[in-house]
Image (spheres, grey):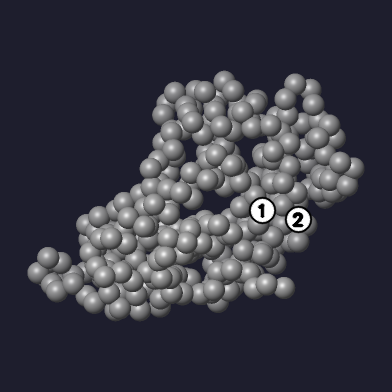
Amino acid sequence: MVVRLTLTFAVLAGLTVPLSAQEPPAPNSIVVTAQRSGAPMWTIDTPTGTVILVGEIRAVPKSTPWQPDRLKEATAEAQRVIIRARPKFSPGDVLRLIFRGGSFTKLPEKNVAADYLDEAQRARLAALETEYDQDYDRGSFLMTSFDLLARRLDFDDSTTKDATEVVRKAADKVDVPIDRPERFRGEDLLDNLAEAEPASHIPCLEAAMTATEAGQEIIAQRGDDWRKFDVPAVMANPLEIALGQCWPWADAEVGEEIRDQWTDKIAGAAGSEGVTLAVVPLRVLAEKDGVLDQLEAREFLISGPEWRTPPQ
């Protein structure tokens, strides 16, 4: 159980001379190198430097033809990188998780799914229970959603390196400074999750059911659209929608803080000299009123793929 909940929070070429002895590469050359990786990205040019925003999706399928080595090369040439932070869990938080586990994994008291879902929603869930020989009647809707996505749809199987790990390892190897948004305390995250009403996770459940019903084809399609820089198509993919509808992204308090942290961190980096390479979750960048929209509202000039869904 602890492992399952934890999941919800859930190289470089050798340099022949010391980095300090070399002339820093031109910002444009770093941008070109990063773009050759095949990941969608945006740039913000300022009087003092450039910020490169790499739009990351987690669990990139092995079938997706991207080139992480190019991102490693760009990382080695950057003056600093920004990557996501992991939640900070203490031994005490693990004990809290063990003793309060029922409040995360089960519906409260003796309630069952039908106490919260309408007939159509319960019928869809029953069909998935039958298909996968599972009983979700007492399970929390969040845990049911994660089970559908991770174990039935199996979206994170057969994946390749994600951009954050590529950049982190490359930066560590050549001592490029790493900056991160402020880490959330495990205690705060667990309290936030424990206080959430079961009904608040129904949109997550509905999206997870839609993704699971769509089948594994959407996994490869999401990777292909990401590689083609078709950001609106990635955002419209049932899997990406489901991941974005679930806690913590969809939580009003935690989700808003995540977005604000990224926006402030990138806006601050725009005033720095040289090149900053930031790896940001694509859904945080490209969603409506997300980081790209907020940066544009602050009058930053952003170059890169279209991220907004075209008007119908």
Q: Nearer the viewer, residue 234 or 267?
A: 267
Indicate which disc residue 210 carries. 2
176 left or right of 99 in image: left
Residue contact between numbered discs 2 and 1, judged by CB atoms under 8 Å = yes
Q: Please provide percent x and percent y for residue 282.
A: 52, 61
The residue lying at 65 percent from left, 50 percent from top is: 245
Q: Amino acid at mark 1?
A: Ala
Q: Nearer the viewer, residue 151 or 7?
A: 7
Q: Residue 18, relative to residue 10: is it above or below? A: below
Label 2: state its secondary structure: helix
Other-residue count near label 2 (Cα within 10 Å), few / some / many at <14 / 14–19 / ≥20: some
Q: Look at 46% across and 33% down and name the residue there.
A: 186
Q: Is residue 56 above or below residue 259?
A: below
Q: Position of residue 255 (x, y in %)?
A: 54, 45
- 214 and 264: which is toward the camera: 264
Which quarter shows the C terminus?
bottom right
> Residue 291: which numbered mark, if any?
none
Label 1: few (<14), some (14–19) or many (≥20) C-alpha neighbours in 10 Å: many
Q: Earlier in the sequence, mark 2 or mark 1?
A: 2
Residue 2 picture quarter: top right
Q: Is residue 215 left or right of residue 220?
A: right
Badge number at residue 242: 1
